[in-house]
Image (cartoon, helix red, strand yellow):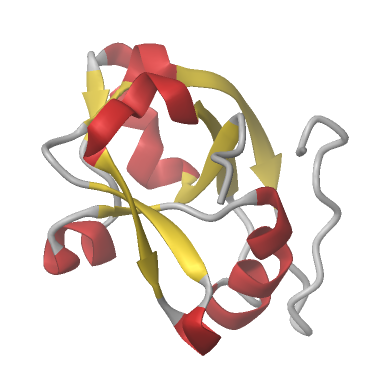
Amino acid sequence: MSTPEFVYKIATEIGFAPARKAASFAGMPIDAKDGYIHFSTAAQLAETLRLHFAGQSGLVLLAVRSADLGDDLVWEPSRGGALFPHLYGGPLPIANIAWEAPLSVTAEGSCELPEAVK
């Protein structure tokens, strides 16, 4: 498997806002519970949003450069055996975030992703 240029983190605006003034982002409560930061690839985003964020607004999509995460980015099987990117070894350095965009997900789980998602 070739590593994509970007992996994506979905966070609430409220949860991510303090990190904008800090050097790192520890993730959302689910990340703390699981012991790593959950990411999705561009191809996995729509399904992740549908399954876990349907009906939510006030979200932010973070595009993170995969290469900057080095060996701390681990690919592990999840739903249906698909490999999902997980960040181990501490918080996400804010400098690794290439861009961010607001997101809202309909009650049915659909969402218009930014054009930059690739």
Reply above or below: 40 against 99.
below
The image position of residue 55, as x and y in percent, is 67, 75
Give the residue at x 34% y 45%. Answer: 15
Reply above or below: 5 against 1.
above
The image position of residue 107, as x and y in percent, is 74, 81
- Left or right, residue 27 beside residue 82: left
Give the residue at x 19% y 34%. Answer: 91
Q: Nearer the viewer, residue 65 or 93?
A: 65
Reply above or below: 33 against 31.
below
The picture quadrant where one finds residue 112 is: bottom right
- Left or right, residue 72 beside residue 14: left
Give the residue at x 81% y 71%. Answer: 110
Q: Is residue 118 visible?
A: yes
Q: Nearer the viewer, residue 22 or 84?
A: 84
Q: Is residue 20 visible?
A: no
- Left or right, residue 22 beside residue 116: left
The picture quadrant where one finds residue 54 is: bottom right
The image position of residue 66, as x and y in percent, is 47, 30
Q: How many labels does the image show?
A: 0
- Left or right, residue 27 beside residue 85: left
Give the residue at x 24% y 23%. Answer: 24
Q: Which of 95 and 102 is in front in this view?
A: 95
Residue found at the far front of this picture: 1
The image position of residue 44, as x and y in percent, is 65, 63
Q: Nearer the viewer, residue 48 or 16?
A: 48
The picture quadrant where one finds residue 19 is: top left
Quadrant containing the C terminus in the rendered view: top right
